[in-house]
Amino acid sequence: MTHPRHLIPLLLLLALPGKADAESPVHAGAAYIVDLLGVVDGGRQRGQAAEGRVDAWIDVDGTALGLEGVTVHIDAMAIHGPDFSGAKANTYQVLSSVEAGTFAHLNEAWAEWQATPGLAVKAGLIDLNSEFDVTETASLFLNSAHGIGPEFSQSGANGPSIFPRTATAVIVRGQSGRKHLRLGVFDALAGSRAEPLRAALRLPGTTGALLVAEAELPLGKGQVQFGGWHYTNHFDAVTEGGAPAVSQGAYAMVEGPVTQGISAWLRVGVADQRANPIASYVGLGLTTEQKGWTFGAALARAALSRPARDAAGNDPALRKTETVFEFTAARAVRPYLLLQPDLQYVMHPSWDPTVPDALVAGLRMKLSWPAK
């Protein structure tokens, strides 16, 4: 569990007025999410776990300080929980989006300048997935694959700049109506060189750069996204003894309302097989709201690359894909409390033919402050 002293900064933030009036330059908030998970059948072994995350943030409007168009954002987190997805269910795609070990860290610390109505520049410690590869409809689900595609999240020495390890970056956003263009330069190494779980502030590109570009265009009442990413440095090849390889990839997503009360999305992504074990990914799903509940069904399918299968001894029994079906329902029972029962069925966990398909039941509880 997280040591109580790690929560002191978060508790101090809670002392700030969360529902400040519109004229206040300071706004703060906090949330606590806990996922109770249990392997009901199959997987590596039966077992239960609690995965949790305390998240507290503060936003400062620089206009009150004479900095017109500038916003400052700081986000601190403390997370707790064991390795449930790997140790119990044996899955590669993490079953809880808050599962990441036990430690406290600074997640984001950035300043943004809205230069014109259509142009903004952001710099600092930034979560890449807050700007790129965001699928709003998929945010309902617990499985981390619906936050950012695993063909992208697998990349980099410590992963790209996403929860729970972020990196410094500079992002430029352009907008014209419903058309958006986002360009980002992230430091290639998320976290500190000596201690990956600790945040490190250094100029983007110090350890190499992760370049990301994304275009978002309107499609009826919905939207379509096209994105690509590329590391300037090379990584060890998946195939033993292979030459250092380039890590890069691309993704596309379409989402939006399909009928009255139903929204859906489809996302596909690919990654360079020479440096990444996952060659491709497909995620899709739909959500609907009924009588105060939000219901959802989703699929996440990660395909193992040919070099990765060769590196595993080219076992003909090795599965080519790991597929997760997720069914969930969420309801705000109080303005500050959300409850969300969840069920996930994993076919071919970690592509391992010796591990049976896993059935995992869960319950997410989320406390938010200020209450919505």
Image: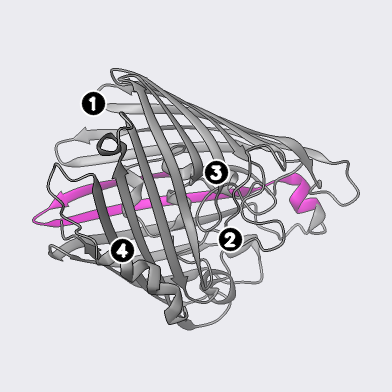
| Left-right relation of 4 to 16 | right
Q: Which residue is mark 2?
A: 92
Percent across and percent down for residue 295 are: 23, 55
Q: Secondary structure at mark 1?
A: loop
Q: Check disc 2: other Cα within 10 Å, few if <14, some if 14-19, many if 20+.
A: some
Q: Is residue 307 magenta?
A: yes
Pick whichever of labels 3 and 2 is earlier in the sequence: 2
Q: Is residue 364 magenta?
A: no
- Residue type marked 2: Tyr
Pick whichever of labels 3 and 1 is earlier in the sequence: 1
Image marks 3 and 4: residues in contact by CB distance under 8 Å: no
Q: Which residue is mark 4?
A: 13
- Residue type marked 1: Lys
Distance Cα–Cα, label 3 vs label 2: 13 Å
Percent across and percent down for residue 323 are: 51, 55
| Rendered position, 44 above or below 371 | below
| Rendered position, 44 above or below 241 | below
Residue 281 is marked as: 3
What residue is rendered at 42% in x and 71% in y? 360
The magenta-colored residue range is 284-310
Distance Cα–Cα, label 3 vs label 1: 25 Å
Distance Cα–Cα, label 3 vs label 4: 39 Å
Nearer the observer, 267 or 325: 267
Image marks 3 and 1: residues in contact by CB distance under 8 Å: no
